[in-house]
Amino acid sequence: MKTARILLCAAALFASASGAFAQAPAWPAKQVTIVNPFTAGSVSDLLARILAEKLGGLWKQNVIVENKPGIAGTISVGKSAPDGYTLMSSSNGHTIINSLNKDLPVESAKDFAGITMIASVPLVLIVAPELPVKSLKELVALAKAKPGTLNFTSAGPASSNYLAGELFKQTAKIDIVHVPYKGTPEQLTGIMRGDAQLSLAFMGNALPFIQSGKVRALAIATGKRHPSLPDVPTFAEAGMPEYHYNSWFGFFAPAGTPPAILKKINADIASVMKLPDVQKRWETVGALTVTDTPEQFDAVIRADTERYGKLLKAAGITPK
């Protein structure tokens, strides 16, 4: 009798557990929102929309991209429920949010979980066409001759363009002034209008304006010349071999998101990025395909948070 009671209890527990598992919905069971803290038309926005389209079909759920420019967009993700239904598409500018903003309710490494890096996009140094320089050396010489008079643009204070520009400023030991814009399109318009003189711009966005002569390219931040800009030297060829900058983009989730969900999103993104039409669309924005594991991406986020925090501190930039 005792054995029978034990068996009956075990069966009841198994049935109860089975029922609980059966009732737990598979992820995703509803719409997934990808927040992009930059304006429409920015690189992170374009990449997110390409992936959202494919992931929606794969998951059989609506996957939407919501633009929330500025630090408010990033905070909204960090404070969202860690259930996989609110994600973020951003750049390595994410790693400096706490170096630029005082008393934020979120921290770049602590309150976000890396899902995967998705792209690396070459940056090209462009100048306004009326600026009287034809090379990187001439630009540096002009900046040193007129300290504090040249402006460099970015897609915002926490953008990859800003980081690249600040690194260029420190590497060249020049005094140039940062002028932040709302996003990439506005940043490029500022150069073409002559409102600002130079920028480290994403190659895919800047390419048509370089080819049409609306801006002039002086150097590209790659190890070798890019096929789309064969006449534009690398920074090393242009006389600044010590300048190195990798502009990456990736997907994030709120910290505490279950590892199983992170791994599923990671694997599904990796699978759709192999599709030929996705590869072709990556090329249209000048992006190179990059994938890694959540653990590897977390390590990159932590390392870049420390590296760029030191860079900004050395530049005398403190949170405001």
Image (cartoon, grey):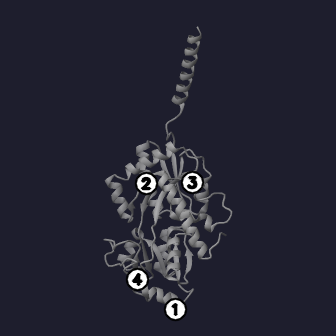
Closer-to-camera residue (202/52): 202
Q: Is residue 89 visible?
A: no
Mark 1 and mark 3: Cα distance apart in space: 43 Å
Amino acid at circle 1: Ala
Identify the element where label 1 is drawn. helix
Closer-to-camera residue (288/275): 288
Task: Give the mark nearest the N terminus, 2 or 3.
Answer: 3
Q: Residue at x 42, y 60 (%)?
A: 119
Mark 2 in CB contact with mark 4 (< 8 angstroms): no
Mark 4 and mark 3: Cα distance apart in space: 38 Å
Label annotation for residue 292: 2
Mark 2 and mark 3: Cα distance apart in space: 16 Å
Task: Give the mark nearest the N terminus, 1 or 2.
Answer: 1
Amino acid at circle 3: Phe
Residue 72, given in percent of the width and then of the height, sits at 61, 60
Q: Residue beneath label 1, please? A: 145
Q: Residue beneath label 3, please? A: 112
Label annotation for residue 239: 4
**Position of residue 215 in the picture relative to residue 314 (left or right):** left
**Position of residue 133 in the picture relative to residue 302 (left or right):** left
Mark 1 in CB contact with mark 4 (< 8 angstroms): no
The quadrant in which the N terminus is found is top right
Amino acid at circle 4: Gly
